[in-house]
Amino acid sequence: MNVTEIQRFCMHDGPGIRTVVFLKGCPLRCAWCHNPETQFAKREILFYPKKCIGCSACAYVCPNGAHNITDTEHIFNRKLCTGCEKCIEACCSKALAASSEIMTTDEVFAELEKDRAFYGENGGVTLSGGEPFMQAQEAVELLKMCKNHGIGTAVETCGYFEASILEEAVPLVDCFLWDFKDGNDERHKKYTGVSNDKIKRNILLADSLGANIVLRCIMVKGVNIKEDHFNAIAELWHRLKHCKYVELIPYHAYGGSKMTALGKKDNGNNAWIPDKNDIEYARGFLERLNVKVKA
Ligand code: SF4
Ligand code: SF4
Ligand code: SF4
C-alpha cells in the first residue's frame, strides 16, 4: 500500500476515536484540496525551505544537479529529479521528505492494532486519502483484516472509483463518509476536474447494497454555497435509503503549505472560507427541504 500517513486519535473521521490511514492517489483535483500530497499515485518529494540549513548535502549526492544552493536560497529543480531519493537520505534537517511509505497490508494492520485499546465500542479504523479505492484490492484486504479482528471500519471517499469494488467493500464498511462536492456538474468539473455523474451513480449503488452513509458536503464560499447545490443535495438525500445525515463542512485554507512543499502554488484562498451565516443559510435551506443536517 502507498500510505502518506497513519494518524492516531482522530475525532472527525467517523464515530468515536479512530486511527486514519491516508492512502495515496486521487482521481479528482479539487481546487481547495487540503491533502494535495495524496493526489498523485506515485511517491513525491516534499521540500520545506524553512527547515533547510543550507548544508549542501543534497546537492552533493544528487546525480542530476537538481539542488542548487546559493548564499541566499535553495532552488530545487524538480524537472531534473528522477526520484532516486538520495537527497532525502542525505538531509539531516528533514527539509526533504518522501510523501509516502510503501507498506504491506500486514504492516499497516500491525500499526492499527496498536491503537485497539482506544477504539472502544464506536471507534475504529478509517481509510482516507486521496481516494482509498484507488488502491481497491489493498483497501479491501485491510478492511477484511479489521473486520476479522473485530475493529470498526469507515471509508472516506470522493465517490469516484470503479463501481465493481462495491459489492465486496460494502459488507466490510460500517460507515461511508461520502463527499458530494457540487450538484452543479459544470462547477463540479471546473473545481474538481471530473463530472459528478459517476459519484452519484456509485453512491446510489452503494445505498442499494445497504451501505451506511454520511453525506459530506464541503461548503466553499462563492463556489458551492448556492441554491442549485442545496437542491441537488436534497434530491440525493431523498433518494438514499441508508443516509444517516448530511454533514456540512466549512472550507479551511489548510492545504497551502503542503502545496508549496510539493513545488506547487499555494491553493489556500481566504475568500472561500464561509462564516457562520453562510453555514446557517445552507442548513436552513436544506432543513426546509426536509434534509437531516449536521453542521
Ligand atoms: S477528493 Fe480529496 S484528496 Fe482528492 S483532490 Fe479532492 S480534496 Fe484532494
Ligand atoms: S531524488 Fe535523486 S534525482 Fe531527485 S533531487 Fe533527490 S537526489 Fe536528485
Ligand atoms: S541536505 Fe537538507 S538541509 Fe542540507 S541543503 Fe539540502 S535540503 Fe537543506
Image: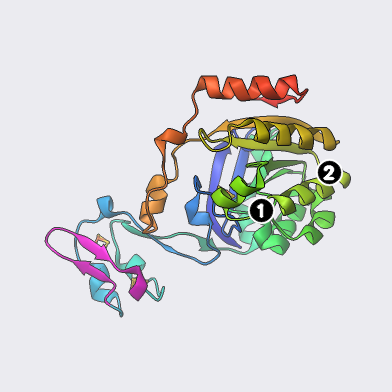
Q: Quadrant of ligand 2?
A: bottom left
Q: Residue at x 24, y 71 (%)?
A: 59
Which residue corresponds to mark 1? Answer: 195
Q: Where is 67 relative to 139, above or below?
A: below
Tell me residue 84's x, y (percent): 40, 75
Local packing at callout 1 (Cα closer than 10 Å; few below 14, some 14-19, many 20+) is many
Q: For this rendering, which residue is in front, 61 or 121? A: 61
Q: Residue at x 74, y 59 (%)?
A: 141
Local packing at callout 2 (Cα closer than 10 Å; few below 14, some 14-19, many 20+) is some
Q: In what quadrant of the picture does the N terminus appear? A: bottom right
Residue situated furthest left in the rendering: 71
Q: Quadrant of residue 295?
A: top right
Tell me residue 108's x, y (percent): 61, 56
* Amino acid type at image mark 1: Ser
* Residues in magenta, as a range: 65-80
- Of pointers 2 and 1, the one earlier in the residue sequence: 1
Q: Residue at x 68, y 31 (%)?
A: 230
Tell me residue 170's x, y (percent): 81, 49
